[in-house]
C-alpha cells in the first residue's frame, strides 16, 4: 500500500485505505504498526506522522 501511494501517507489515510473506521483506536493501531515497520526498515518516516515504503537497495531490486 505504501509502495503504491503517490506520496507519504498518514496513519489515518492508511486506516481508511484498509477499510477501517476512522476511530482513534484504529488509527492508533495503524500508527503503531507503521512505527514498527519503520524501525524494522520496511517503511520510512518521511516527516512527522508521514510514512512511505522503504527504499529498495539497487542490489535487491533485481
Image (cartoon, helix red, strand yellow):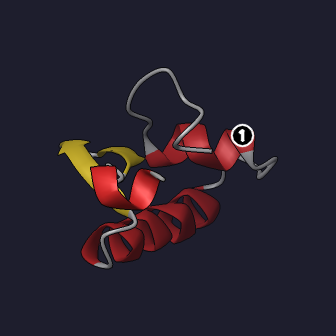
Q: Is residue 57 visible?
A: no
Q: Nearer the viewer, residue 57 or 16?
A: 57
Q: Going by the picture, which residue comes out furthest to the top?
A: 6
Residue matched to label 1: 17
Q: Nearer the viewer, residue 5 or 27?
A: 5
| 43 horizontally vs 46: left or right | right
In the rendered image, residue 20, in percent from the top left (x then y), is placed at 77, 52
Query: Residue 47's image quarter?
Result: top left
Above/below status of 62 relative to 5: below
Q: For the N terminus, give its image quadrant.
A: top right
Q: Tell me the residue at 75%/49% (across/down).
A: 18
Q: Tell me the residue at 31%/66% (across/down).
A: 38
Q: Is residue 2 visible?
A: yes
Q: Going by the picture, which residue comes out furthest to the left?
A: 47
| 59 horizontally vs 27: left or right | left
Query: Residue 59's image quarter?
Result: bottom left
In the rendered image, residue 14, in percent from the top left (x then y), is placed at 59, 45
Q: Tell me the residue at 82%/47% (across/down).
A: 19
Total count of labels: 1
Q: Nearer the viewer, residue 37 or 26?
A: 37
Above/below status of 6 relative to 50: above
Crowd around label 1: few <14 · some 14–19 · many ≥20 (10 Å): few
In the rendered image, residue 61, in percent from the top left (x then y), is placed at 44, 52
Q: Secondary structure at mark 1?
A: helix
Amino acid at each position: 500500500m505504501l509502495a503504491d501511494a503517490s506520496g507519504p501517507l498518514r496513519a489515518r489515510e492508511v486506516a481508511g485505505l484498509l477499510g477501517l473506521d476512522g476511530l482513534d483506536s484504529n488509527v492508533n493501531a495503524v500508527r503503531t504498526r507503521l512505527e514498527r515497520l519503520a524501525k524494522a526498515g520496511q517503511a520510512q518516516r518521511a516527516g512527522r506522522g508521514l510514512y512511505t515504503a522503504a527504499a529498495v537497495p539497487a542490489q535487491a531490486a533485481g
